[in-house]
Amino acid sequence: MRRRDDRMKYTHIQESAYEANMQLPRLNLVLFTFGNVSVVDRDAGVFAIKPSGVPYEALSPAKMVVVDFDGNVLEGTLRPSSDTLTHAVLYKHWPLVGSIVHTHSTYATAWAQTQRDIPVYGTTHADHTTADIPCAAPMNDAMIKGNYEEETGRQIIQCLAEKGLDYREVEMMLVGNHAPFTWGKTPAKAVYNSAVLESIAQMAYLTEQIKPGSARLKEALIQKHFERKHGPDSYYGQA
Amino acid sequence: MRRRDDRMKYTHIQESAYEANMQLPRLNLVLFTFGNVSVVDRDAGVFAIKPSGVPYEALSPAKMVVVDFDGNVLEGTLRPSSDTLTHAVLYKHWPLVGSIVHTHSTYATAWAQTQRDIPVYGTTHADHTTADIPCAAPMNDAMIKGNYEEETGRQIIQCLAEKGLDYREVEMMLVGNHAPFTWGKTPAKAVYNSAVLESIAQMAYLTEQIKPGSARLKEALIQKHFERKHGPDSYYGQA
Amino acid sequence: MRRRDDRMKYTHIQESAYEANMQLPRLNLVLFTFGNVSVVDRDAGVFAIKPSGVPYEALSPAKMVVVDFDGNVLEGTLRPSSDTLTHAVLYKHWPLVGSIVHTHSTYATAWAQTQRDIPVYGTTHADHTTADIPCAAPMNDAMIKGNYEEETGRQIIQCLAEKGLDYREVEMMLVGNHAPFTWGKTPAKAVYNSAVLESIAQMAYLTEQIKPGSARLKEALIQKHFERKHGPDSYYGQA
Amino acid sequence: MRRRDDRMKYTHIQESAYEANMQLPRLNLVLFTFGNVSVVDRDAGVFAIKPSGVPYEALSPAKMVVVDFDGNVLEGTLRPSSDTLTHAVLYKHWPLVGSIVHTHSTYATAWAQTQRDIPVYGTTHADHTTADIPCAAPMNDAMIKGNYEEETGRQIIQCLAEKGLDYREVEMMLVGNHAPFTWGKTPAKAVYNSAVLESIAQMAYLTEQIKPGSARLKEALIQKHFERKHGPDSYYGQA
């Protein structure tokens, strides 16, 4: 049986998950309850996630539900997000991820509904990743009828693997016909990635409207911009 | 002649209708007075609806007009919404509807102006209904010149019937060349449906722009997402 | 020489013009100073208009410039809007107009840039006018090099005449390659018309994107919706 | 070694650069830190610029970094914007520029991603420049791998030269596959130009959507509108 101390030790991820969830409506990334953020405690092997279907204005740190990597509830009286097992699978397979965000933001979701990757058309995109934003194919019917949320996590992992991408470099993707998922080392970075993805998705849409058949960004610019912000010789931001 | 008690007993639907109407501008679903919400009292056989052409900022619960299912005014000194008879017909035919919303929200109205159903392209749509959002055909000239608002209600009912849809499952639709109507068991749900429809309409528009000829969501995913949120085995939200 | 009383008698149109101008940024119809409203005093044969190039946040009733129908400044130390003579011509020819609004609102201006009329695609449009929103052709070079602003007013008047439209029924239009002008009996109505035009312009754009070749609204619906709101048998709004 | 007085003399451009940078989020021109403004002191041969990667809400005048025209930091403990050398090159070659702005605003960046100039489709555009908004071609690989930011500045200068344009007349442009740069005599004008460019970019996009093959504004109107606002006979704004 858990002692009082056990419960107290989850407070930091509940507070952190609360703060991160509250950023989603402020950044215009969610309508009503269509999104959720989780924050992991690697030492404890648990994460805190938004309760299912509760409006953002009714949330509080104490309402964040704490679950283990199999989705068992350890703390909290509410039911966790229906996407909890997707988060769980990703935490299990990706040891360096600290936070995961799921939204139905307008432009990223529209791209997901087309099942297309978002081509890298400019430096705004290349500042964040050298790859086209990958879109995982929808699952087959057996997977959908099985453990759907767990399979969604596996679908994400497999899509990155097939494309030879590393989750530490590509921190955002689309699930075909569904919506975007992003992640990062910290909750701030994971939420940041959701807002960046929405902006990239809108710009790529407009680019194709303004000039159908626009060319992908040339390789030298992709590398240059990504290296300005990332890696050993980066010089963007404060050291 | 009505007694004072009669009047008092409408206060609850007037307050409820007032609150629901005030949500429309907050959710960016109306410009000026282009929308209205009604709330029914099934026992009394009456509903409260926004007065016609009165700006939202000038509304109050007492200004909500109470009418019976034939549109006769029972309470209130203002003229009810010009769409009142459309609401009345729907309440008469659909015994489990508690509230009806009409807006001219931008994307849903643009779809209505094309007379197209909105195809189900993703899980955001399937979370709310398994059907394409139906668009009722515009009326013939005799109906337009007859009791136009009543015919609008009949057009909505007939469109659902022709497509074999149930108003308890599909709570939103378009009236061709006009604009959307949504409904629900409660005012909160009916207003929620209007905002969801606008979001679905925008995403479907973008989906077709990003990839003309995008495929409809596969059947297994439609069923899965709808059942996650609705029906006996739903596991979205709090029990 | 004018007496103090003369000056005082313009205060009502200066205040009215100030209030109406301040509505434009609130309704998201202007960027910086790209718009202006004027209000006429028919008895005095003068109108008050926004000073040229002054930011909205720096305006006050006393800064509204009062001019006669030839554009001579009667009151105020600032230069009037560079579009003043366009307003003057319209007031001179249209005795029942009480206020005129000019903006560069995004969607209406984009339509003006295509030199296309905005087709009536739905009831939102027909609630306000039975006609397509007319777009006046750009002027010939001699007119542009002559008194450009006065010619803009004449271009508007001539466009309505050629299409057989009455300024009392059609209170909004586009000037080709330039931007929209709207008017009305009162400043509130003229500003309302600018916001309605922007909404109609956006919906018509989306309608054509969602379904190229969308049909114009059928005549019976055009008449029905216009008559609901206007004319002897109207039943929209409060009597 | 610099004396205290040296440091104090930069305060005016730091304050000015701070105020100008804070306008970018207010005008919806930046997401997170995707933009920067610099302000020059011509007598001192230095300019103040936003520090790299610092959120707008964490900025203060003292955090603005002061650098010379070779990008050497003279004042400030933070690293300057990674785009600093682009600003430096422009100040060096353009003696009458007082301030430079770089953003990744949505519509202007989408145009940049297509490598197309923005055609002058209307008077909103011609009010600001008679030229199509030029888009500089992306650099060759050697330039990208060399001093990338300095080359970006040279690319901008060369693009204007090739098109026979003067930086005192055309105060805004696009860098292909990257994003917009604007400038002006004052910080207020440079920021104003960024907002105007974004609006022009959105309207031009919509113009082509509403009518593919829309014609460029006729020459007489281009000249008329530019001369209304600029040059010896201008009559827009206050004298």
Image (tube, coloured by chain):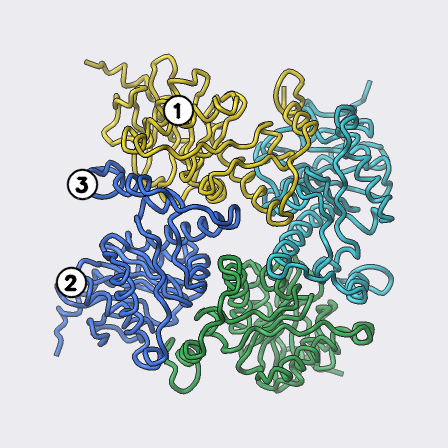
Chain colours: A blue, B green, C cyan, D yellow
Q: Chain of mark 3?
A: A
In what element is the residue under mark 1? strand
In this rendering, the label closer to the viewer, 1 or 3 = 3
The residue that mark 3 highlights is: A232
| Residue under the point 34% across and 63% down | A102
User: Quadrant of residue B231 in the image?
Assistant: bottom left
- The local crowd at label 1, few if under 14, some if 14 to 19, many if 20 or more residues have their Cα within 10 Å, is many
For the C terminus of chain A, the quadrant is top left
The image quadrant where one finds the N terminus of chain A is bottom left
Asked if marks 2 and 3 fall on the same chain, the answer is: yes
Residue for point 79% across, 61% down: C226
- Quarter-of-image position of residue B162: bottom right
Q: Amino acid at mark 2?
A: Arg
Q: Position of residue B4 (x, y in %)?
A: 68, 79
- Reading the image, the residue beneath label 2 is A42
Q: Which residue is mark 1?
A: D39
Amino acid type of the residue tagged 1 in the rendering: Val
Q: Residues within 10 Å of mark 3 (few under 14, many from 20)?
A: few
Q: Is residue A175 left or right of residue B170?
A: left
- Chain of the residue where label 1 is placed in the rendered structure: D
Q: Residue, x 83% and y 46% (percent of image)?
A: C167
Cα–Cα span, label 1 and label 3: 31 Å
Q: Secondary structure at mark 2?
A: loop
- Image coordinates of residue C18 in percent, x first then y, are 67, 37
Q: Tell me which numbered mark, 2 or 3, is placed earlier along the sequence.
A: 2
